[in-house]
Image (spheres, rainbow, N blue to C red):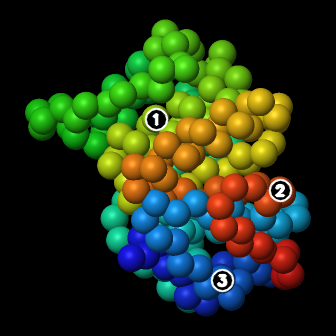
Amino acid sequence: MSVVEARGLGARTRRGWVFRDVDLDVEAGERVTVTGPAGSGRTSLLLALAGCFRTSAGTVRRDGVVALAHVPGVHEPEPALTVAEHVEERRLLLDGPFRRRRPVAIDPALDPGTLGRDLDVLGRHRLGLTLARVAGPAAVVVDDVDSGLSAEERALLDEALDALTADGIAVIAAAREAGTGRVFELDGQR
């Protein structure tokens, strides 16, 4: 069953199309890597699939929450908050102060006392995935999974993404090059 389904999806600005004619189905527990050249609209497409970017053509259907993980320049850690404070803040935003508190497991590779500004690229990704899990998502979108990481760090991030899919959560990732899972290529045609 599809947790995210896009048909003829497109976004147009005064400068032209950011992306267009996107048809994409993402199943529960599936990993899809969106690739394409710089400026092809990878990040904008991820945000649109999560409901955080306005589209001008087509439709997108979500069966459950589509949560944002790390999206550089859009969804990043607050510099002055610790990892633990980020998680508590997200939980409070989703649960409210008087509702039942959802259990949240912080990625064991993260030090709960580390400030957002002190996280390296892998740490920002790990925190983003932890925060996305708080929402109990059907799918998670994560950007730049192959940028600023060593081969070893990319392998560790792949393991973290695989843990999501093993739990039945779909992962839609953007990368410059094809990665793990099914590949969906944007051609950058405007």
Across and down, in percent, residue 71 comes to 64, 46
Say whether disc 1 or disc 3 marks the residue closer to the N-terminus: 3
Across and down, in percent, residue 130 comes to 46, 35
Say what amino acid the circle numbered 3 marks: Val
Quarter occupied by residue 146: top right
Q: CA distance from mark 1 to mark 3?
A: 29 Å
Q: Quadrant of the N terminus?
A: bottom left
Q: Quadrant of the C terminus?
A: bottom right
Say what amino acid the circle numbered 1 marks: Thr
Say what amino acid the circle numbered 2 marks: Arg
Left of 185 or right of it: where is 160? left
Say whether disc 3 or disc 2 marks the residue closer to the N-terminus: 3
Residue drawn at 53 percent across, 19 percent down? 110
Q: Is residue 85 visible?
A: yes
Q: Residues within 10 Å of mark 1 (few under 14, many from 20)?
A: many
Quarter occupied by residue 158: top right
Across and down, in percent, residue 42 comes to 73, 64
Do tag 3 and tag 2 residues touch (Cβ < 8 Å)? no
Q: Which mark is residue 22?
A: 3
Which residue is label 2 attached to? Answer: 176
In the rendered view, would you say 7 is above or below 156?
below
Q: Nearer the viewer, residue 141 or 81?
A: 141
Q: Which mark is residue 130?
A: 1
